[in-house]
Image (spheres, rainbow, N blue to C red):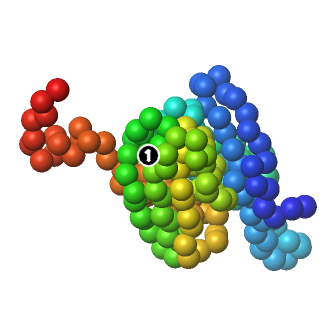
Amino acid sequence: MARKNNQESSSDNSSGLDERVISVNRCSKVVKGGRNFSFSALVVVGDRNGHVGMGLGKANEVSDAIRKGGDIAKKNLITLPMHGSTITHSVEAKFRAGKVMIKPASKGTGLIAGGGMRAVLELGGVKDVLAKSLGSANPVTVVKATMEAIMMLRTKDEIYARRNIVRNN
């Protein structure tokens, strides 16, 4: 049995959300009768149009862990501010030991990112971006740091509204 199944499934649900399993981890507990195994599944969902969410499901069966992770991810959807096919501005974010750097790129560059970051940005609908994971290689930490980075993104209108600046359009 493989410990980590990168991009194991990609399915289209009735709600229009794509679901991708980033990793599945197995944990064992030694008890009187032998070993008890439990599984955790990191799942990312998105509509490829600016909405993305992540969830970490835990259960005694792999399929139940994936289902729980998908349900949690659907409840934690966030909006990804975009400028055309890229993000609005450069951002660096940190979650525990995981640090990510995401930069906008010109049209036609493509999605240059690895591992869990790639899945999050892909399901969020970003097509042109430069991204680098610094620090931790743990998929859970990298995905959570990527979600932190997405939450830090702002549009011009949000920034102007916060500064109480009236734009002349």
Quarter occupied by residue 70? top right
Most foreground residue, 128 or 80:
128
Which residue is pictured at 26% across the width and 42% down the height? 156
Spot occupied by residue 67 in the image (x, y as percentages of width and height): 69, 42
Residue type at mark 1: give it: Ile
Q: Which image quadrant: the C terminus?
A: top left
Taking 110 as reference, is 75 left or right? left
Which residue is pictured at 12% across the width and 47% down the height? 163
Taking 76 as reference, is 66 left or right? right
Which residue is pictured at 52% across the width and 32% down the height? 49
Spot occupied by residue 36 in the image (x, y as percentages of width and height): 82, 67
Q: Which image quadrant: the N terminus?
A: bottom right
Q: Does 29 appear above or below 153? A: below
Taking 126 as reference, is 1 left or right? right
Most foreground residue, 49 or 144:
49
Residue at the spot of label 1 = 87
Spot occupied by residue 145 in the image (x, y as percentages of width and height): 49, 62
Spot occupied by residue 29 in the image (x, y as percentages of width and height): 77, 73
Most foreground residue, 141 or 36:
141
